[in-house]
Amino acid sequence: MSMERGGTCNSTNREIRIPKYVQSVCHSAPPWLISVSLGLIAMQESKDVFAGVSMISNESYIFLAVLVVLALVALIYLLSPMSLPDEPLLYLIGVNHTVQFKSALSQLFSESVSVRAKREAFKAHVAEMIDKLGIEVLAEEFSEEIKRKPQERETALNDQSERARFETALALCNFETVLEQFSEAKGIEHRFCDPDSKERKALGIEESDWGKREQVWLSRIADCKLRRVLFVCGDNHYDAFAQLLENNGFNVRRGERYDISDEEFHDLADNVIETQERAGEFREW
């Protein structure tokens, strides 16, 4: 048996012509398409081989075996889980909000080594899960309002020149959450899900109404049950929100948790900025 130019394959007493569309496909198509095409030829040629006796020879059996193998490869590929669409899921991560967003004050002054390490670990984990799970939506318990720039009462700079230098430095700060940064870098949809102060007032949400806030988060991803979502919430909400999601039809996969203890916040003796954040700006309410 030999292969001749022009797309023919000669056996002892028989010539098998490979269709021109297969010849052209083989030059540019992916392997799976080539396998499928050859597999179809294999099935047709198998009928012809068994129908006649002219090809019953050792070379014919070898040729037939090759065609059958190609057909099996094509079938396995088509039935492989890799070819099936990914199942919808929501991957939930619990955090201390300082990990989720580095405030301007922390960027301008200092933060503890432990907080910095936790944030880097969080970033690495989010990056891994985005690629591993094929994440389509990044959502988080956060709002534009929380990312506000420091107010005058927080900076306490009376000297005009000092304030000018501070404003210049402030302009260089990054006012994006970790998820926002990944959204821009990877082209993934991003959603803030926490109501701001005006929305909380309109909805009658008080400090102790965690359940009402969680209901708002749920409403803002209600259209994502058939998508692959990564959601970041405060660690204090982790278990309750996971249960709420499951009760409302989400396929929840519980992920890592990145809480920060008081000791980790204060592992720098002069860390006044983070003490203020722990007490006020990022408190869980």
Image (cartoon, rainbow, N blue to C red):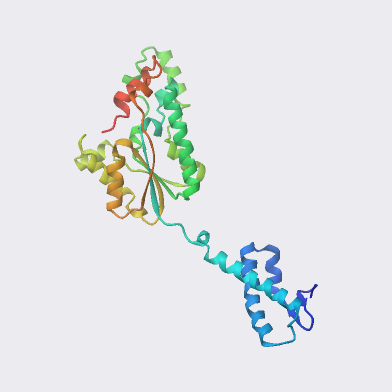
Nearer the observer, 81 or 245: 81
Question: Measured along the vertical axis of the image, is residue 175 above or below residue 36?
Answer: above
Please name the residue shown 78% across and 74% down the image. Answer: 6
Say whether residue 250 is left or right of residue 129: left
Q: Give the image location of residue 120, x and y in percent.
A: 47, 32
Question: Measured along the vertical axis of the image, is residue 190 above or below residue 74?
Answer: above
Q: Give the image location of residue 111, x and y in percent.
A: 42, 22
Q: Is residue 18 visible?
A: no
Say whether residue 85 is left or right of residue 32: left
Please name the residue shown 72% across and 74% down the image. Answer: 63
**Residue extending furthest bottom?**
52
Please name the residue shown 29% across and 24% down the image. Answer: 279
Quarter of image, res 146: top left
Nearer the observer, 73 or 85: 73
Assign the N terminus to one quadrant of the image. bottom right
Q: Give the image location of residue 56, x and y in percent.
A: 73, 83
**Residue extending furthest top?**
159
Q: Give the image location of residue 131, x and y in percent.
A: 50, 47
Question: Measured along the vertical axis of the image, is residue 207 above or below residue 217?
Answer: above
Assign the C terminus to one quadrant of the image. top left
Nearer the observer, 221 or 134: 134
Quarter of image, res 284: top left
Q: Is residue 103 visible?
A: yes
Total labels: the figure holds 0
Question: Measured along the vertical axis of the image, is residue 186 above or below residue 66?
Answer: above
Quarter of image, res 207: top left
**Residue extending furthest front?**
58
Say whether residue 89 is left or right of residue 5: left
